[in-house]
Amino acid sequence: MPDQPLSGRRIIILEDDYYQAHDCQEMLEHAGAKVVAISATIPDLDALLAQGPIHAVLIDINLGHGLSFDFARELKARAIPFVFLTGYDAAMLPDDLTGSAYLSKPADCGRIVNALASHAGGTR
Amino acid sequence: MLVSIFSRPHMYTAAKDQRMADFSPDHDTSLFGAAFDLLPEAACILAPVDTAEGEEADWRYLASNRIHGKLLGNAALVGQTLRSAHPDIGPEWFLDLARVLATGKAETAIRNHAVKPIVYEVAFSPLTSTGRSAVMVRLRDITGERHDRERRREADERYKLLFEAIDEGFCIIDVIFDDAGKPVDYLFIEGNDAFIQQTGLVEPVGKTMRTLQPDIEDKWSATYGRIALSGVPERFESESPAMGRWFDVFTFPVGNAAPYQVGVLFRDVGSRKTMELALRHSENRLQSLIGATSDLIFRMNPEGTLMEQLGGANLLGEVNGQSDWIEGFVAPGDQGRVRAAVDAAISANTPIEIEHRYIRPGGEVGWLYSRAVPVFDEQRTITEWFGMATDVTASRLAERQLAHGAQMLRVASEIGKVGLWDWNVETGEIYWSDEHYRMEGYEPGEIEPTYEVWAERVHPDDREAASALIAAAMESGEDYVNEYRVCHRNGDIVWLSARGRFLYDEQGKPVRMLGAMIDTTQRRREEEWQKLLVAELQHRVRNLIGMVRSVARLSAPSHRHVDDYVDHLIGRLQAMGRTQSTLTRSPGRSVDLSELVREELLVHAVQPDKCHVDGPEVALSPHAAEIVTLAIHELATNSIKYGALGDTGYIRIVWSNETRDGKPWVSLRWQETTQRRKTKQTRKGFGRKLIEERVPYELQGTGRFALHDTGVLAELEFPLSDAGSILDTRS
């Protein structure tokens, strides 16, 4: 289904802004994804994984209460794909995370969906 | 034949002695006898007398010539025996006569007169004729001759002693001329010990100078040749490089006619000459020194009032003879001081040493450093002063400039908060300026600075790099430039930006390192801050755009009319804008809740008599402030349109602090009291969503929105957090 590139993909949205988180959720669900969690704080990964696989995580770098790099590292360690979505520059990324998939806010739907699709193993 | 000689009356005749009967008188008249008698020397002939056993031997005069008789004062000796004629005769005569007779050999002897102080030279000649033997004795009075010879011998002896005793070398030479009459060499005839010592020539007598010293200078032969020919003594002093000596020479002719032998009396004056030369050099040097020195050399009378320039620099201009120098040259302001110093030195007999101003020949004032030492006589009375004066104007000026420069540097480094160091690489000594101590977290002078003390303060992460940079600068000669952290004892960390430079000796060995540094902690902090601000601004702008987009979309469904929609949207954007301006006014700081509420009410023109605002002082994070502002905006807008603020209603906005699970929470309540509401609102609008969903989502709190008959009751509860902006979390 060409208009649902994230069909069946289980995705987590980590975004501290309520409005943007919901916009994003709406957008991803429209693309066929199943958003298993939206959160302004670091979620309990184990609990979420217990419910099913996670194909990708969309991460805002600044979660208000702290930066999300440690969570990104955890994802990396567990081989769960992720894409940074942030208002900051890519230069913000620490050395061990440079090269990670990265989108600069504001990003339109297409770019977010494409980025996630290419990392989450969605239909090509 | 001989017998006939004795024919003269002086001869022995038988008549006088029986035993001499064999002599016949007729012999006396012979020619031989006459010749014998006329011999120019005293002569006699003696024949032994036959003597009986045990009788003393005796000799009889057979002949005695006239001179002989005269010499002995007896003309009638012939016929007499020796013992009878000379009763005092010594036994030696008999021994001499017997021996000559026995040996048959002539002898000559020196014999003294038996009683008179007369010395004879006696020649004994044996005579033999026809079996008869006699001895002819010739006498010569040599008393005077002997005396002369004795005197000459003594004189010779004395001369010899003198010759050997004198220190001067002495020799007599024969000058050798070549065929052309040119003196070419000379032969040593005689020489004393001193001559050998002072020339070093080995066994010179009998040798020529050229044999002894082949490279001898020609001048010596020439000089001696001249004297040998002229006979005029000369005195001169000359050097012989060939012999490595200096001689003081007196030469004089010896002999009666030219070419004379030459007597040479001389002395090796090498050491004196060396000393003279050394002295002359030393004097020359002293003169040169006095001439060349930039000091003024002077002498002064015992009272220290009159001064005479001896040489050296002409510091005072043209001054002839003595002058009152204090009056004449010392600057008026210093005259009293100089006078006092001179008087003190005179009374204490100590050298004078004083620095004072003086009037230069050109009239300007200079500085003079004068020293003088007293010269004493035997009674320890000062006879004069001898001294030097140096113009020290330039160095005084330099000193003052140096002091001025040092003061400038100190003040500048204090004001500029520059820390200075001077590291003596060879000794390890380090100087720190006061500011440097403070930069290292010490009181000035608190500790002895060393490389180790410095290194210990450097942040462990920066230490290795700092040491490496210093080593590289030392190696390359390029400036040391480094910015590093220093940990103070109290835990403070400061950033220092240092620049240093090594100094090297002629061999290129590093000897010192000088450097300066400034505290860049504040600048670093500001740079960090600015970096954060820029990043935050970027973040916010991007977030804001995203939010505007969301707000715009969320605002859309509840309004049928574009005008309403625009009003709402603009209101919300303005509320967001107010939060932003509040935050920008005091970036990174919290926002006072009371202030926020009152401002929001003011914006909506809520009269003070229509509301009650009360609550403790609460500091909200920027994030919370943003949400609360928007919430108050929504509630106020809603209330104006539909509720209490639209008519005679009343609003209470109160909040309180509380602690939940050890964290501070704030609980805010908005309560409207109105007679009636204009519309019953059922749909979940923007404001309600904000309170009920966004507050939990973003602030991890709770939000309730209830619509009662008396109006809206909204409650927001959330934990207070410093977070909400990167500016807060990253500090």
Image (tube, rainbow, N blue to C red):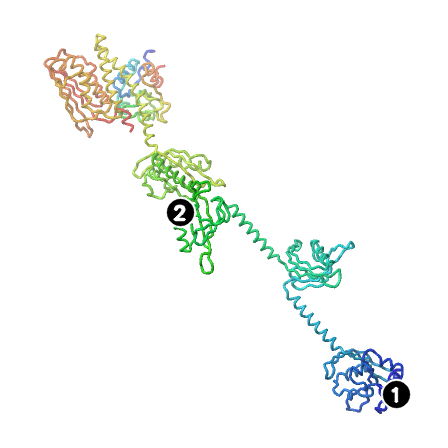
In this picture, is B403 found above or below B241? above
Q: Earlier in the sequence, mark 2 or mark 1?
A: 1
**Which of the two residues, B275 or B505, is positioned nearer the viewer here?**
B275
**Which of the two residues, B545 or B525, is positioned nearer the viewer here?**
B525
Residue B268's quadrant in the figure? bottom right
Is residue B169 among what the camera can see?
Answer: yes
User: Mark 2 sits on what residue?
Assistant: B335
User: Mark 1 sits on what residue?
Assistant: B25
State the image coordinates of residue B427 (x, y, percent, origin top left).
42, 44
Say few, some or many: other residues with alpha carbon within 10 Å of mark 1 (under 14 / 14 to 19 / 20 or more): some
Considering every residue shown, the one lying at the far left of the view is B675
State the image coordinates of residue A116 (x, y, percent, origin top left).
33, 18
Considering every residue shown, the one lying at the far top of the view is B561
Q: In front: mark 2 or mark 1?
A: 2
Q: Amino acid at mark 2?
A: Gln
Is residue A57 among what the camera can see?
Answer: no
State the image coordinates of residue B569 (x, y, percent, origin top left).
23, 13
> Do dots 2 and 1 share one subunit?
yes
Q: Secondary structure at mark 2?
A: helix
**Which of the two residues, B685 or B409, is positioned nearer the viewer here?**
B409
